Image (tube, rainbow, N blue to C red):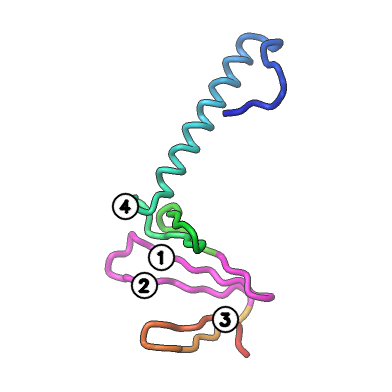
Amino acid sequence: MSRPDRDIRILPQWAQQYIERLEKDVDSWKSKALAAASVGNLATNVVLCDGIEQRGLPPNSTILFVLGESRIEVHHDRGDIKRNRLTVRSLGTRLFVHPAAANTIYVGEPE
């Protein structure tokens, strides 16, 4: 981990050791987060696709979309094996669900 332009050698030994341990912890958590975010990781069931690359999100993540004045949450609970579906919840307004094709729907605010 890169440290800001401050010399910690002027601090007491216990403080130096504490800062070094914190830096190692941060590096460790960053590597764990990157490993969990890999698409091939079976621990994730939600993948973020930004058009260039795909990154996994933590298992059972809830994604919040902002559409105008409303907020829409989308959640997939991997723990409920009997219900292989998404939960879509509107926060603040009713949802408009419009079928577009056999495999596509549009979700948004009522027109």
Q: Are marks 3 and 2 in contact (CB under 8 Å)?
A: no
Residue type at mark 3?
Gly
Left/right of residue 80 with respect to residue 97 in the rendered view: left
Badge nearest the viewer, 3 or 2: 3
Disc on the earlier residue, 2 or 4: 4
Q: Residue at x 31, y 71 (%)?
A: 83
Residue 86 vs 57, above or below: the answer is: below
Q: Residue at x 51, y 26 (%)?
A: 24
> Farthest residue toward the left?
82
Q: Is residue 87 magenta?
A: yes
Q: Which residue is mark 4?
A: 42
Residue type at mark 4?
Leu
Q: Which residues are magenta?
A: 64-92
Q: Which residue is mark 1?
A: 76
Q: Residue at x 61, y 71 (%)?
A: 71
- What distance separates the C-alpha of mark 2 from that of mark 4? 18 Å
Residue type at mark 2?
Arg
Q: Which residue is mark 2?
A: 85
Q: Quadrant of residue 2?
A: top right
Q: Which residue is mark 3?
A: 108
- What distance separates the C-alpha of mark 4 from that of mark 1? 15 Å
Residue type at mark 1?
His
